Image (spheres, grey):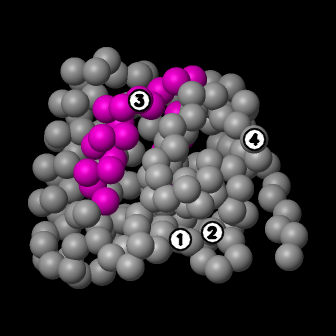
Amino acid sequence: MKIKHKSHEGLGDKGKIIGSIPNVQSKVELYEKALKEIKKNVKNVDSIVPRMATVVAVLKNVMPHYFWCGFYFAEEYEMIIGPYQGTVACPNIAYSGVCGTSAKRKETVVVPNVHEFPGHIPCDERSNSEIVVPLINEKGMVIAVFDADSTHFSAFNEVDKKYLESMIPILLEKEN
């Protein structure tokens, strides 16, 4: 089964750099703020989809270097879009590019320059860097990935990785 993907220009000015990359201390403070807000808002929420929606809404509004963020559900033959914030996303993507690589490896992938990443799937040509974190259930299966894009090159680092990985258990908890 061959899946065709079409790039689109997104909304707004082509090539425009959006937001700024916070320094390490600011990132830590912003992630701490986001984590507190996420935990408060998903308390007593039993379903993963509203939890995902809360995570992307909070992160997109708190993190200035996020251009787009969202989830892709891992299906048998392709990945299907879940809750997201930002410009229109590819509704389905192959197990290639950054999301597919993260899902196949079952590990977080940080890409400083997506244009140099083999098989990158450009849903919006303004994205220049990306981080993808897999959601792995208790059986060791990837059920989805969290994907964040930035219009900046090298926007994501170990601070982003640490905090985003720490949010995965909040999404997968049976009860909060």
Pointer 2 or 3: first along the chain:
2
Q: Position of residue 119 (x, y in %)?
A: 76, 47
Label 3 sits on residue: 157
Magenta stretch, residue numbers:
147-168
**Which residue is at the front of the view, 126 or 2?**
2
Label 1 sits on residue: 73
Q: Nearer the viewer, mark 2 or mark 4?
A: 4
Pointer 3 or 1: first along the chain:
1
Gap between marks 2 and 3, in whole Å?
A: 25 Å
Element under label 2? strand
Say if mark 3 contacts mark 1, CB within 8 Å.
Answer: no
Label 2 sits on residue: 79
Three-letter amino acid code at disc 4?
Pro
Q: Is residue 17 visible?
A: no
**Residue 146 in magenta?**
no
Q: Quadrant of the N terminus?
A: bottom right
**Residue 152, above or below 68:** above
**Residue 151 in magenta?**
yes
Q: Position of residue 42 (x, y in %)?
A: 20, 67
**Which residue is at the front of the view, 8 or 1?**
1
Q: Position of residue 166 (x, y in %)?
A: 26, 51
For the residue carrying disc 1, how many other residues have a C-alpha within 10 Å: few (<14), some (14-19), or many (20+)? many
Label 4 sits on residue: 118
Say if mark 1 contacts mark 2, CB within 8 Å.
Answer: yes
Three-letter amino acid code at disc 3?
Asn
Element under label 4? loop
Q: Quadrant of residue 173?
A: bottom left
